[in-house]
Image (cartoon, coloured by chain):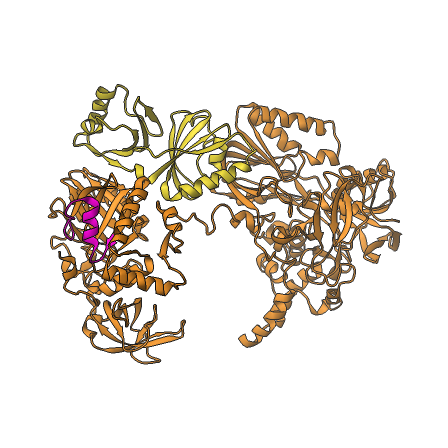
Amino acid sequence: MSGPRRGDDCGSIRFTFDGKELLARPGDTLAAALLANGIGLVARSFKYHRPRGIMAAGVEEPNALVTVGTGGRSEPNTRATDVFVYDGMVARSQNRWPNLAFDVGSVLGLAAKTLPAGFYYKTFFGSAKRWMFYEWFIRRAAGLGDAPSEADPDRFSQRAAFCDVLVVGAGPAGLAAALAAAEAGESVILVEQDSLLTPSLVRDPQELGPAWAQATAVRIRALGGRILLRTTATGYWDDNLITLSERLAEPGEQPPNGTAQRLWHVRAKRVVLATGALERPLAFAHNDRPGVMLSHAVRTYVRRFGVVPGQRVVIATNNDDAYLTAIALRDAGAEVVAVLDTRPAPAGASSGFPVHNDTMPLATKGARHHLREVSARVDGKIVRWQADLLAMSGGFTPVVHLHMQAGGAALNWDEASQSFLPGAARQSVTSIGAAAAADPVGPTPSPENPGKAFIDFQNDVSLGDVDLAWAEGYRSVEHLKRYTTLGMATDQGKTSNMAALGRLAEKQGVAIPEAGLTTFRPPYTPVTMGLLAGRTERDAGAHLRRLALYEVHQAKVPIWQPLGYWKRPRAYPQGTETLAQAALREARGVRQAVGMTDVSTLAKFEVSGPHAAALLELICATTVAKLAVGRGRYTFMLREDGLVFDDGTVWRLGEDRYLLTSSTGGADRMATHISYVRQFLCPQFKVSAVNVQEHYAGIAVAGPQAKAVLAALIGDEPPRHMSTTSATIAGLPVIVLAASYSGERAFEIYVEASQAEPVWAACEAEVIAQGGCLYGMEAMEFLRIEKGHLVVGGEIDGRLTPHELALGGMLNKADGFVGAAGLTRPALTQPGRKQLVGLEALAGTIPEGAMLITAPGQPAEGHVTASGLRVLDGGSIALGQLNDGFARRGELLLASSTTRGQSARVRVVAPHFYDIGGERYRD
Amino acid sequence: MTDLSITQLPAARLNVLEIWSNPLAVLDRFKKAFGPPLPPLGSSLQLLDRQLIRYEPTVWLVEGETTGLAEVLGSDGSLTAIGGGIVRVRLSGAGWRSLLMEGGVFDAESETFAAGCSAATVIDHVNVRLLVESDDACLAYVPLSYAHDMIHFWTVAAQSLV
């Protein structure tokens, strides 16, 4: 016996496994290449660190999990049977130390009796403190492979597709179905997770061979069909939406075009599932030893890859299919020393192999992690065969998970094949081929030693564990699964579920269908996290929005601040200035001379038509209709429940034309609200409300010299406070709104965003000429807090009424606005509700977000919404919400932030610290 | 890489035309003024100096000249300028349909989405309006604030289209 071998042609593709340089042929899976190089020991099992080899030849492989690739491309838990070798591939075994052959962790196997199913639940209990102790060990022991510590450098694509027919599986049945649909004029997508079409025809040559498959594929493509190889259907969702995972590069491989994988969202009119069937292992003692393989897999390695996994072979089966493996092995030069068939001897011709009926393996023995001996009870006596390969077949399980995810109403139990077949479907889906029918099988006897008869190889679950769970009272299949971990992890029970169900049914004394089924959750075959959430062209799930003047700001090297979806300048430091120093300088520049800032992100809506004012009086809680042309006013908006959710300004630009501005962060919400009011509350209105947020770039100029700056820019008298005018700056038409968010005389200049740069340049030149400066978000915050202006998301948090924000006097007396009815709710006038207050520190700095308490240990009565300082005079001030705050002016409180570890004594004051009378707005 | 080029076009004059009342009368006035009818939903009309693209039941995007439209609308609708906030990106070459499927949810590969057709859809979380110019080109109207990232997204995505 010499174990697995291949002919003289070892191939020319170089790869390494555990640092050893090896060769592979083109088209080899890693598993095939390892077997071709005589390597049978590939992995260590999860729990007991038992030596494991290669059992399967496809995605159902439970044992041969390896890490492929290096750095950020490293991909743990890759099935060696589902990765194709490429030049330079680096593969490593997992879950072993110091090496695969000598793994210290295998000592756990010696203590297997103390680590049965439910071990965690029985052992790690007690106080939370003890759990903290256990957790360290559990986390060290848990998991297979190591997640990469570096970011994945590759791109992951997501793509949509639509078709008449999606065929999953390009075996003979799937290929034929795809061809039939294409020839019927239907648009077809055919997906196959292997790298080959009809791989089963390579394993089992028939009249319709690979040449037929290639010709059929050519025909399908010629008819407009799309064929995707290395593509797995990962989930079946509502309305015939199927997600596909396409590998554009093998695990760990540098993708040729930068994109490693593509997630397809396919909407199909109908779906054909030709997903085939998976072979089941047999349960007997030490059936997990390297050299024990599935019969189909053995035939695949022989016929497809030219690798003979063993030279002296025992075949164990309960069906006819394994005899094809015997033939394939014999043809390849191996010796089939015994065929153990659980069925009675048939009458008639001999197979030509030494067949023993009514038996199956008792156990295996090995040496140096290789199979050496197989034993079985034949005619009442134990017979032993020297063998280096055991090919087993316990029948076939149709792959029905997509059918069930599609809302399959039922699975039909087929007694002859001992398998579930797809039943009725709720969506437009049909199953064909081996996914819809399975060949009959003979009996599957129970092993004499269930404790070492593994059924879930990946999770080290044996029949003995199932028996133990039953004995300990776990009756439901779902409980059994969770208690034993059977069918979990990357394996998802592909080769184990039927054996476990059979055992459970046996314990329950019922037929298998009555034992119940676990849930068929997607994905059945693992997908990488990168595919679902990997880097595309955005960093945080959505693109950051760029200002029209982004490049202008960037040239000044500002400190950028994410604000909602936007990126805005926070400050423009000079020299070695810190953020705080720069912001204070900028704020003082505004107070003492003039400053300018970019306010393009404000929400803006142009409302026009005969009913424009009527629409705005629904949306805004203040009066609008009485505004004269050329005038504007501060306004705010309520939800139906009467609480303030946004604020802004409204300007009458023409007889029937208004401009409404509102907060940056609430822009999308406001657009939705306006649409709701327009479409549902007043569809009869003759009005158009268009979102012009992006159409206009906005530049705010504020400070005592602002009027002079504007006069120089527009060559005319600037509009008075809360007035508007059209003008020309740098030869471009602009709208000037005389509005302030700083406490100073100020103007907002709106220009078409695509033409904003010359206007900004002209403004900047004039501001600098007047001794002013640019200012960013941080300075703006200082200025607005000092003046007592509100911000959405801070003081306006959707929980306060206009009265509680000291805005009640501005409410439209005529009512009729959205939220007017909600405002009358008695609950909104109950004592103890939060009200807007100002806070000034007696000493120190008021921490932002601090709780307002009367004394340490007392409950919070409010919180600090924004903290700033007196721009010119110094001293910490803040705005906040406080229970019954209006009546508590003069009271001393403690602003305490446990998260910041800071606190300050504060006095409750009015929420205005600067120019309370508004004198600075007047010319 | 498939045959594909991504080109940012100069800023254009774009207006929203919205009809709020008497649509049949407006359609009649439009036909009298310009000849052909206003295009139906998902479609467009190319005139000598302007293009009208219908994206919503009562809304058209007007690219180019607006002379005469105010008279057509009368008191039954309005025009609002939005061109400052939209970047036009031309996707040309055989691969434009495949490119639009990247990060998309709309069937740009459908043969019925032919020259003159339009759509308002979402691509990689961004609201984008599409106008098929020909078998080999499609115009995408992208919000200005997203244009830089979207062009980058398309440029990189195009590299993996084969």
What colour is chain A? orange
The x, y position of residue A76, in whole percent, is 64, 54
Left or right of residue A366: residue A132? left
| Residue A624 in the image, given as x and y percentages of width and height | 15, 49
Report which quarter residue A456 is drawn in: bottom right
**Residue A686: % across, % down:** 18, 37
Question: Is residue A902 something that shows in the picture?
Answer: yes
Up-down relation of residue A628 to residue A45 (above or below): above
Closer-to-camera residue (A792/A76): A792
Image position of A345 with respect to B70: above or below: below
| Camera-side residue of A706 and B74 | A706
Residue A467 placement, left or right of B45: right
Q: Quadrant of residue A777?
A: bottom left
Q: Nearer the viewer, residue A665 or A264?
A: A665
Is A375 placed above or below A82 here? below
Could you tell me which residue is drawn at 83 percent across and 58 percent down? A368
Q: How many marks?
A: 0
Is residue A719 one of those drawn in magenta?
Answer: yes
Q: Residue furthest front?
A: A769
Q: Quadrant of the C terminus of chain B?
A: top right
Q: Position of residue A291 (x, y in %)?
A: 80, 51
Magenta range is A701-723
Query: For the N terminus of chain B, which image quadrant?
Result: top right
Q: Which chain is yellow?
A: B
Residue at (28% x, 72% y) in the render:
A875
Can the viewer see residue A639 in this picture?
Answer: no
Q: Is residue A566 magenta?
A: no
A691 relative position to A58: left or right: left
